[in-house]
Image (tube, rainbow, N blue to C red):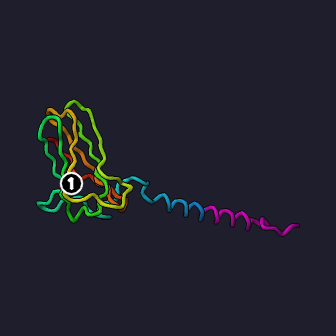
């Protein structure tokens, strides 16, 4: 009789044990958030403005322009991109990026961006902020 690895079922038990350990190790990786998913609010910088300190200021000087101003704040010092989506009263959406989520240099305080289009009636402005730590959060969701 051969006294190999599979003698008396020891080899099968070892293989089963290794398979269970492998599955456990693989499942640990499944607990991580997928790339691009929002981080938990406790992680990274907060995009919530402090009392009296707005992260962005939105104005509409006329029916064909919306101005987004970024005065800056300590809560957003690592902000590298603002993704601006404006949905006009007819349901047409326009999305523009200000900065780059791949950048390492934050958006400079005190800058503004003008978006041209047909903005008669009520328009929804939704802005997501992307941070250098890889997180992203809603900055503002408002109607003007």
Q: Nearer the viewer, residue 136 or 69?
A: 69
Which span of residues is magenta-colored?
1-19
Residue projecting furthest to the right: 1
Q: Is residue 12 magenta?
A: yes
Which residue is at 88% across, 67% downward? Answer: 1
Which residue is at 13% across, 45% downward? Answer: 59
On screen, residue 67 versus residue 93, left or right, reads: left
Dominant SS of magenta comes to helix
On screen, residue 116 versus residue 60, left or right, reads: right
Q: Nearer the viewer, residue 41 or 114?
A: 114
Spot occupied by residue 120 in the image (x, y as percentages of width and height): 15, 32
Rendered image quadrant of residue 119 = top left
Which residue is at 25% across, 61% downward? Answer: 76
Kindly state the secondary structure of the residue where label 1 is placed. Answer: strand
Position above or below: 91 against 96: above
Which residue is at 73% across, 66% downward? Answer: 11
Spot occupied by residue 82 in the image (x, y as percentages of width and height): 28, 51
Q: Nearer the viewer, residue 132 or 38?
A: 132
Residue, disc 1: 111
Spot occupied by residue 51 in the image (x, y as percentages of width and height): 12, 62
């Amino acid at each position: 009789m051969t006294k190999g690895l599979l003698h008396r079922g020891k080899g099968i038990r070892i293989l089963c044990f290794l398979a269970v350990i492998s599955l456990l190790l693989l499942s640990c990786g499944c607990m991580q958030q997928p790339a691009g998913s929002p981080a938990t609010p406790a992680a990274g910088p907060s995009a919530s403005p402090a009392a009296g300190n707005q992260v962005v200021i939105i104005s509409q000087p006329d029916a064909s322009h919306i101005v987004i101003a970024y005065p800056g704040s300590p809560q957003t010092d690592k902000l590298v991109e603002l993704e601006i989506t404006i949905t006009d009263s007819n349901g047409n959406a326009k999305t523009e990026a200000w900065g780059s989520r791949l950048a390492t240099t934050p958006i400079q305080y005190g800058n503004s961006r003008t978006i041209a289009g047909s903005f008669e009636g009520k328009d929804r402005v939704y802005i997501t902020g992307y941070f250098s730590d890889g997180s992203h959060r809603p900055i503002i969701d408002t109607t003007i």
